[in-house]
Amino acid sequence: MVSIISNEYSISFNEEGFLNLNQIIKENKYSKIFIIVDENTNNHCLPKVLPMIETEVDIEIIELESGEENKTIETCVQVWNVLIELGADRKSLIINLGGGVITDMGGFIASTFKRGIAFVNIPTTLLSMVDASVGGKNGVDLGGLKNQIGTITNPELVIIDSEFLDTLPQNQMRSGLAEMLKHGLIANKQHWEKLKNLNKIDFEDFDSLISESISIKNSIVMEDPKEDGIRKALNFGHTLGHAIETYFLENSNKKTLLHGEAIAAGIIMESFISLEKGMISTMEFLEIKKTINHLFEKIEINENEHQNIIDLLIHDKKNEYGKVQFALLNGIGKIKINQTTENEIIIKAFLEYKK
């Protein structure tokens, strides 16, 4: 698999990724290496990664608790203190080995510690491979609201190793698939067509679909690194999806949703809003709804919860001048950014999702 070149760093696959990592370590003469893991990647992924790193530099392992609920500034403070205690300095390297929570938070920890130290992302879930580890976005949640505090700082390298997916539960695989489907819907109809017929996919070739999905996101990010324009296209499904995810995270009587589960619901609802605004056809909407519903279980959202979720939309970091901003489909494979809509249509989208 050929490396994908992003802004000032490469996204490398499998063994080539570790060769590139060793070259970076050799060239930069890091004083110390810290690997951030959670309990899952410590057990399942670290034993593969450690033998691949060729260095005489001291390596320290920092284990965090898994889960979105731990993606907080309080966790970061704990890690910053540990880094100081273990003698980290400006020439240290952090390797983030884990899913989106680890790569998001680890990147934020590195980009702010001593005004920024080098870091490498090794995503271990499908979601983090095709989404969280690409584009330089790092951050933590605040008060239950997703990714309110963060930076846009690029890693030195991203390593994609699909062997890590072998131990991933099916619901985690589907969570990543939601982002891949989104990439097709917003920018590449052929990618959408391949993914919607999953039963016809030869999973021996799944690496190429992962690479294709990363390339779609990477091309958008390279065109607009700071999210001033077209990068907002990547927010399709996320305006309502993030609000649903936050609502379920905040309410103890609700089960915590995986990111992709919430985004799948957001994709259906925001596709419906696109339909209501005359931007996609009924046939296109039904195709999207049928595909998503076939792959994802429907989330139970009661009518008396609609307004609570809508109230969360105003906190979305994508909003400008107090207006809720949507990226909406303009036909499958095309997108329009900076779209607004009425609350009545959003309510109709909730009701349509429930059907």
Image: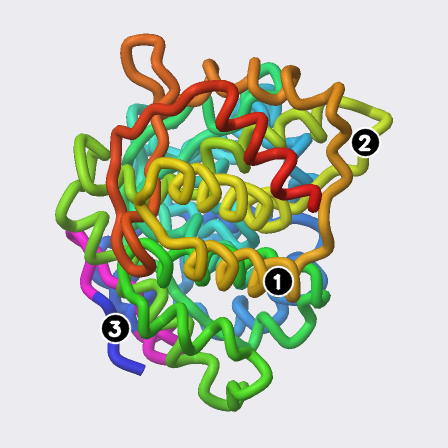
Amino acid marked by disc 1: Arg
- Label 2 secondary element: loop
Residue 115: x, y in percent?
Answer: 29, 24
**Mark 1, other Cα within 10 Å: few <14 / some 14–19 / many ≥20:** many
Q: Is residue 9 located in the magenta-colored stretch of the structure? A: yes
Residue at 54%, 37% in the rendered image: 241
What segment carries the magenta color? 5-19
Looking at the image, is 156 positioned above or below residue 159? above
Say whether residue 330 is left or right of residue 240: left
Q: Can you identify the residue that label 3 sits on?
A: 3
- Label 1 secondary element: helix
Foreground residue among 306 and 226: 306
Amino acid marked by disc 3: Ser
Residue at 43%, 20% in the rendered image: 342
Q: Earlier in the sequence, mark 1 or mark 3?
A: 3
One can see residue 82 in this view: no
Q: Earlier in the sequence, mark 3 or mark 2?
A: 3
Residue at 38%, 24% in the rendered image: 341
Residue 126: x, y in percent?
Answer: 53, 63
Residue 193 image-quadrant placement: bottom left
Residue 206: x, y in percent?
Answer: 47, 81
Q: Are marks 1 and 3 in contact (CB under 8 Å)?
A: no
Q: Can you identify the residue that label 1 sits on?
A: 174
Q: Is residue 49 located in the magenta-colored stretch of the structure? A: no
Say whether residue 226 is left or right of residue 300: left
**Mark 2, other Cα within 10 Å: few <14 / some 14–19 / many ≥20:** few
Foreground residue among 54 and 259: 259
Residue 228 image-quadrant placement: top left
Point out the image quarter for the N terminus.
bottom left
Q: Can you identify the residue that label 2 sits on?
A: 254
Say whether residue 299 is left or right of residue 346: right
